[in-house]
Protein backbone atom coordinates (compact mmCIF):
# COMPACT_ATOMS: atom_id res chain seq x y z
CA UNK A 1 0.00 0.00 0.00
CA UNK A 2 2.87 2.36 0.87
CA UNK A 3 4.52 1.66 -2.48
CA UNK A 4 1.27 2.33 -4.31
CA UNK A 5 0.81 5.70 -2.54
CA UNK A 6 4.39 6.69 -3.31
CA UNK A 7 3.90 5.73 -6.93
CA UNK A 8 0.75 7.84 -7.20
CA UNK A 9 2.57 10.78 -5.65
CA UNK A 10 5.43 10.40 -8.11
CA UNK A 11 3.04 10.28 -11.05
CA UNK A 12 1.23 13.38 -9.80
CA UNK A 13 4.48 15.32 -9.61
CA UNK A 14 5.49 14.20 -13.10
CA UNK A 15 2.10 15.17 -14.52
CA UNK A 16 2.41 18.62 -12.93
CA UNK A 17 5.88 19.31 -14.34
CA UNK A 18 4.79 20.54 -17.81
CA UNK A 19 2.46 23.12 -16.25
CA UNK A 20 5.14 24.23 -13.80
CA UNK A 21 7.73 24.67 -16.52
CA UNK A 22 5.46 26.48 -18.96
CA UNK A 23 4.53 29.01 -16.26
CA UNK A 24 8.18 30.11 -16.07
CA UNK A 25 8.42 31.23 -19.67
CA UNK A 26 9.84 34.73 -20.26
CA UNK A 27 7.43 36.68 -22.43
CA UNK A 28 8.68 38.20 -25.67
CA UNK A 29 6.13 41.01 -25.57
CA UNK A 30 4.65 43.30 -22.93
CA UNK A 31 1.37 44.55 -24.31
CA UNK A 32 2.17 45.68 -27.86
CA UNK A 33 5.83 46.32 -27.06
CA UNK A 34 8.27 43.63 -28.32
CA UNK A 35 10.75 42.65 -25.62
CA UNK A 36 14.31 41.84 -26.57
CA UNK A 37 17.65 41.71 -24.80
CA UNK A 38 18.73 43.37 -22.55
CA UNK A 39 15.18 43.81 -21.24
CA UNK A 40 12.92 41.17 -19.75
CA UNK A 41 9.39 40.74 -18.44
CA UNK A 42 10.21 39.27 -15.04
CA UNK A 43 12.86 37.80 -12.73
CA UNK A 44 15.38 35.67 -14.61
CA UNK A 45 14.57 37.38 -17.93
CA UNK A 46 16.82 39.72 -19.90
CA UNK A 47 20.01 41.14 -18.39
CA UNK A 48 20.09 41.25 -14.57
CA UNK A 49 21.57 44.77 -14.68
CA UNK A 50 18.29 46.07 -16.12
CA UNK A 51 15.99 44.03 -13.88
CA UNK A 52 15.32 46.80 -11.35
CA UNK A 53 14.85 49.51 -13.99
CA UNK A 54 12.59 47.88 -16.56
CA UNK A 55 9.58 45.76 -15.53
CA UNK A 56 6.39 44.55 -17.15
CA UNK A 57 3.09 45.00 -15.34
CA UNK A 58 1.45 41.70 -16.26
CA UNK A 59 -2.06 42.87 -15.36
CA UNK A 60 -1.94 46.12 -17.31
CA UNK A 61 0.53 44.78 -19.90
CA UNK A 62 2.54 47.97 -19.56
CA UNK A 63 6.32 48.23 -19.67
CA UNK A 64 7.56 50.54 -16.91
CA UNK A 65 10.79 52.40 -16.21
CA UNK A 66 11.53 52.86 -12.49
CA UNK A 67 13.86 55.21 -10.65
CA UNK A 68 13.88 56.54 -7.09
CA UNK A 69 11.64 59.41 -8.25
CA UNK A 70 8.84 57.21 -9.53
CA UNK A 71 7.55 54.82 -12.20
CA UNK A 72 7.18 55.95 -15.80
CA UNK A 73 5.48 54.25 -18.78
CA UNK A 74 7.79 53.18 -21.61
CA UNK A 75 6.22 54.50 -24.81
CA UNK A 76 8.60 52.80 -27.27
CA UNK A 77 12.00 51.18 -27.68
CA UNK A 78 14.39 51.75 -30.58
CA UNK A 79 16.43 48.55 -30.47
CA UNK A 80 18.50 49.55 -33.51
CA UNK A 81 19.81 52.74 -31.92
CA UNK A 82 19.51 51.47 -28.31
CA UNK A 83 17.13 54.14 -27.07
CA UNK A 84 14.07 53.86 -24.86
CA UNK A 85 11.43 56.58 -24.73
CA UNK A 86 9.45 57.19 -21.57
CA UNK A 87 6.72 59.59 -20.53
CA UNK A 88 6.23 61.33 -17.20
CA UNK A 89 2.53 61.77 -16.35
CA UNK A 90 3.43 64.76 -14.15
CA UNK A 91 5.38 66.52 -16.89
CA UNK A 92 4.05 69.76 -18.36
CA UNK A 93 3.55 70.03 -22.11
CA UNK A 94 2.19 72.64 -24.46
CA UNK A 95 -1.34 71.34 -23.87
CA UNK A 96 -1.20 70.71 -20.12
CA UNK A 97 0.62 72.10 -17.10
CA UNK A 98 0.70 70.51 -13.69
CA UNK A 99 2.92 70.48 -10.60
CA UNK A 100 5.75 67.97 -10.60
CA UNK A 101 8.40 66.70 -8.21
CA UNK A 102 10.95 66.30 -10.99
CA UNK A 103 12.78 63.45 -12.65
CA UNK A 104 16.09 61.79 -11.86
CA UNK A 105 18.13 58.75 -12.83
CA UNK A 106 19.51 56.30 -10.31
CA UNK A 107 23.25 56.78 -10.07
CA UNK A 108 23.94 53.09 -10.78
CA UNK A 109 21.32 52.60 -13.51
CA UNK A 110 22.71 51.40 -16.88
CA UNK A 111 21.18 54.39 -18.68
CA UNK A 112 22.22 57.85 -19.76
CA UNK A 113 20.38 60.75 -21.30
CA UNK A 114 20.20 61.00 -25.06
CA UNK A 115 21.80 64.10 -26.53
CA UNK A 116 18.47 65.21 -28.03
CA UNK A 117 16.86 65.68 -24.63
CA UNK A 118 15.83 69.21 -23.74
CA UNK A 119 14.56 70.05 -20.24
CA UNK A 120 12.85 73.31 -19.39
CA UNK A 121 12.22 74.28 -15.77
CA UNK A 122 9.01 76.25 -15.32
CA UNK A 123 7.86 78.79 -12.76
CA UNK A 124 11.09 78.99 -10.76
CA UNK A 125 11.55 81.54 -8.00
CA UNK A 126 14.00 84.19 -9.18
CA UNK A 127 14.45 85.33 -5.58
CA UNK A 128 15.39 82.07 -3.87
CA UNK A 129 15.93 79.32 -6.42
CA UNK A 130 19.50 77.88 -6.34
CA UNK A 131 19.56 77.82 -10.14
CA UNK A 132 20.23 81.56 -10.01
CA UNK A 133 23.46 83.12 -8.81
CA UNK A 134 24.64 86.61 -8.09
CA UNK A 135 26.05 88.47 -11.06
CA UNK A 136 29.26 89.72 -9.47
CA UNK A 137 29.08 92.99 -7.55
CA UNK A 138 25.58 93.98 -8.70
CA UNK A 139 22.23 92.54 -7.69
CA UNK A 140 21.33 91.18 -11.11
CA UNK A 141 20.46 87.50 -11.10
CA UNK A 142 21.96 85.41 -13.87
CA UNK A 143 20.23 82.10 -14.51
CA UNK A 144 22.49 79.07 -14.93
CA UNK A 145 21.01 77.83 -18.15
CA UNK A 146 21.61 77.12 -21.81
CA UNK A 147 21.48 80.55 -23.43
CA UNK A 148 20.90 78.94 -26.83
CA UNK A 149 17.55 77.69 -25.55
CA UNK A 150 15.94 81.15 -25.55
CA UNK A 151 13.72 80.43 -28.60
CA UNK A 152 12.52 77.21 -26.99
CA UNK A 153 11.60 79.01 -23.79
CA UNK A 154 9.74 81.73 -25.68
CA UNK A 155 7.77 79.16 -27.64
CA UNK A 156 6.91 77.17 -24.53
CA UNK A 157 5.65 80.29 -22.77
CA UNK A 158 3.48 81.02 -25.80
CA UNK A 159 1.51 77.81 -25.16
CA UNK A 160 -1.91 78.57 -23.74
CA UNK A 161 -1.57 76.03 -20.92
CA UNK A 162 1.77 77.49 -19.75
CA UNK A 163 0.65 81.09 -20.18
CA UNK A 164 -2.11 80.35 -17.65
CA UNK A 165 0.57 80.09 -14.97
CA UNK A 166 0.52 83.89 -14.99
CA UNK A 167 4.26 84.14 -14.45
CA UNK A 168 6.86 86.42 -16.05
CA UNK A 169 8.02 85.12 -19.40
CA UNK A 170 11.47 83.59 -19.08
CA UNK A 171 13.75 83.50 -22.09
CA UNK A 172 16.23 81.32 -20.26
CA UNK A 173 14.72 78.11 -18.91
CA UNK A 174 16.54 75.28 -20.66
CA UNK A 175 18.98 73.30 -18.53
CA UNK A 176 21.35 70.54 -19.53
CA UNK A 177 21.85 67.47 -17.30
CA UNK A 178 25.42 68.49 -16.43
CA UNK A 179 24.13 71.68 -14.85
CA UNK A 180 22.07 69.63 -12.40
CA UNK A 181 24.79 67.17 -11.39
CA UNK A 182 26.29 64.03 -12.94
CA UNK A 183 23.26 61.91 -11.97
CA UNK A 184 20.84 64.59 -13.19
CA UNK A 185 19.10 65.04 -9.87
CA UNK A 186 16.23 67.30 -10.90
CA UNK A 187 14.53 67.86 -7.56
CA UNK A 188 12.05 70.63 -8.31
CA UNK A 189 11.32 71.20 -4.64
CA UNK A 190 14.96 72.01 -3.94
CA UNK A 191 15.19 74.01 -7.16
CA UNK A 192 11.99 75.83 -6.16
CA UNK A 193 10.35 75.33 -9.52
CA UNK A 194 6.75 74.22 -9.85
CA UNK A 195 7.08 72.08 -12.97
CA UNK A 196 9.20 71.07 -15.93
CA UNK A 197 8.82 70.13 -19.58
CA UNK A 198 10.94 67.57 -21.37
CA UNK A 199 11.17 66.92 -25.09
CA UNK A 200 13.37 64.78 -27.31
CA UNK A 201 12.26 65.78 -30.81
CA UNK A 202 10.86 68.84 -32.57
CA UNK A 203 9.12 66.45 -34.97
CA UNK A 204 10.18 68.62 -37.91
CA UNK A 205 8.24 71.60 -36.52
CA UNK A 206 10.67 73.66 -34.44
CA UNK A 207 8.33 76.66 -34.29
CA UNK A 208 5.24 74.69 -33.24
CA UNK A 209 5.50 73.41 -29.63
CA UNK A 210 2.14 71.65 -29.92
CA UNK A 211 3.69 69.08 -32.29
CA UNK A 212 6.89 68.46 -30.29
CA UNK A 213 7.48 65.02 -28.85
CA UNK A 214 7.44 65.37 -25.09
CA UNK A 215 9.06 62.80 -22.85
CA UNK A 216 12.55 61.52 -22.04
CA UNK A 217 14.92 59.59 -24.29
CA UNK A 218 17.44 57.31 -22.59
CA UNK A 219 20.42 55.47 -24.08
CA UNK A 220 21.63 52.08 -22.90
CA UNK A 221 24.59 49.79 -23.59
CA UNK A 222 24.78 46.00 -23.68
CA UNK A 223 28.15 45.90 -21.96
CA UNK A 224 31.43 47.79 -21.75
CA UNK A 225 32.19 47.25 -25.45
CA UNK A 226 28.48 47.52 -26.37
CA UNK A 227 28.61 44.16 -28.17
CA UNK A 228 25.38 42.22 -28.63
CA UNK A 229 26.03 38.81 -27.01
CA UNK A 230 26.16 36.19 -29.81
CA UNK A 231 24.62 33.54 -27.53
CA UNK A 232 21.64 35.80 -26.99
CA UNK A 233 21.31 36.48 -30.71
CA UNK A 234 21.20 32.72 -31.40
CA UNK A 235 18.63 32.28 -28.64
CA UNK A 236 16.31 34.96 -30.04
CA UNK A 237 16.64 33.56 -33.56
CA UNK A 238 15.27 30.29 -32.23
CA UNK A 239 12.22 32.07 -30.74
CA UNK A 240 13.75 31.98 -27.29
CA UNK A 241 14.08 34.76 -24.72
CA UNK A 242 17.44 35.60 -23.18
CA UNK A 243 17.64 35.28 -19.44
CA UNK A 244 19.86 34.35 -16.55
CA UNK A 245 19.93 31.93 -13.67
CA UNK A 246 22.05 30.25 -11.06
CA UNK A 247 24.29 31.66 -8.38
CA UNK A 248 26.42 33.59 -10.90
CA UNK A 249 23.50 34.81 -13.06
CA UNK A 250 24.76 32.70 -15.96
CA UNK A 251 23.15 33.02 -19.38
CA UNK A 252 20.11 30.86 -20.12
CA UNK A 253 17.88 30.67 -23.17
CA UNK A 254 14.24 30.42 -22.11
CA UNK A 255 12.32 28.51 -24.78
CA UNK A 256 8.59 28.67 -25.65
CA UNK A 257 8.07 25.42 -23.73
CA UNK A 258 9.45 27.04 -20.60
CA UNK A 259 12.58 24.88 -20.62
CA UNK A 260 15.93 26.62 -20.16
CA UNK A 261 19.03 25.75 -22.18
CA UNK A 262 22.56 27.13 -22.23
CA UNK A 263 22.52 27.63 -26.03
CA UNK A 264 19.28 28.04 -28.00
CA UNK A 265 15.90 26.45 -28.67
CA UNK A 266 17.01 24.55 -31.78
CA UNK A 267 17.57 21.34 -29.77
CA UNK A 268 15.66 19.34 -32.39
CA UNK A 269 16.18 16.62 -34.96
CA UNK A 270 15.29 16.37 -38.62
CA UNK A 271 14.03 13.04 -39.84
CA UNK A 272 14.74 11.75 -43.31
CA UNK A 273 11.14 12.52 -44.35
CA UNK A 274 11.62 16.20 -43.58
CA UNK A 275 9.61 16.20 -40.32
CA UNK A 276 11.09 18.65 -37.82
CA UNK A 277 10.58 18.04 -34.12
CA UNK A 278 9.46 21.21 -32.33
CA UNK A 279 11.16 22.22 -29.06
CA UNK A 280 7.97 22.03 -27.01
CA UNK A 281 7.34 18.50 -28.35
CA UNK A 282 10.80 17.39 -27.26
CA UNK A 283 10.25 18.85 -23.81
CA UNK A 284 6.95 17.01 -23.44
CA UNK A 285 8.42 13.71 -24.71
CA UNK A 286 11.35 14.01 -22.32
CA UNK A 287 9.08 14.52 -19.32
CA UNK A 288 6.75 11.67 -20.20
CA UNK A 289 9.68 9.37 -21.00
CA UNK A 290 11.16 10.19 -17.62
CA UNK A 291 7.85 9.38 -15.99
CA UNK A 292 7.52 6.00 -17.67
CA UNK A 293 11.14 5.17 -16.87
CA UNK A 294 10.78 6.00 -13.19
CA UNK A 295 7.54 4.03 -13.04
CA UNK A 296 9.23 0.99 -14.59
CA UNK A 297 12.12 1.26 -12.14
CA UNK A 298 9.76 1.63 -9.20
CA UNK A 299 7.84 -1.51 -10.18
Image (cartoon, helix red, strand yellow):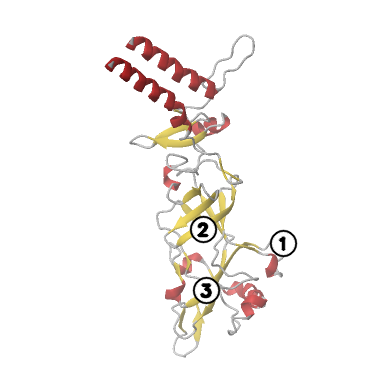
Residue indicated by mark 3 = 99
For mark 3, does the 10 Å Cα neighbourhood hold few (<14), some (14 to 19), or many (20 or more) residues? some
- The quadrant of the picture occupied by the N terminus is top left
- The quadrant of the picture occupied by the C terminus is top left
Residue 145 visible in image: no
Residue 204 numbered mark, or none? 1
Q: Residue furthest left?
A: 2
Answer with mark 1 or mark 3, whichever residue precedes in sequence: 3
- The relative height of residue 256 versus residue 296 in the rendered view (above or below) is below
For mark 1, does the 10 Å Cα neighbourhood hold few (<14), some (14 to 19), or many (20 or more) residues? few
**For residue 169, which quarter of the picture?**
bottom right
Secondary structure of the residue carrying tag 3 is: loop
**Distance from label 3 to label 2 (Cα)?**
16 Å
| 10 sits to left or right of 100 | left
Answer with mark 3 or mark 2, whichever residue precedes in sequence: 2
**Distance from label 1 to label 3 (Cα)?**
28 Å
Do labels 3 and 2 touch, CB within 8 Å? no
Amino acid sequence: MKSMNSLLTLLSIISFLPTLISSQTCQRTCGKQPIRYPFGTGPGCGDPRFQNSITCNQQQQQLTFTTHTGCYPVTSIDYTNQIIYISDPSMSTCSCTQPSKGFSLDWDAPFSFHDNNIFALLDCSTASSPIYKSGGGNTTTVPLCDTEGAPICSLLYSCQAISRLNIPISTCCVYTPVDLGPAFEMDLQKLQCSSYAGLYSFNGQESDPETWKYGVALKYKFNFNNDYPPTCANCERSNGACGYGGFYNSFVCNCPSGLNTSTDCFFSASWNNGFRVLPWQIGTWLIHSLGWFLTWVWL
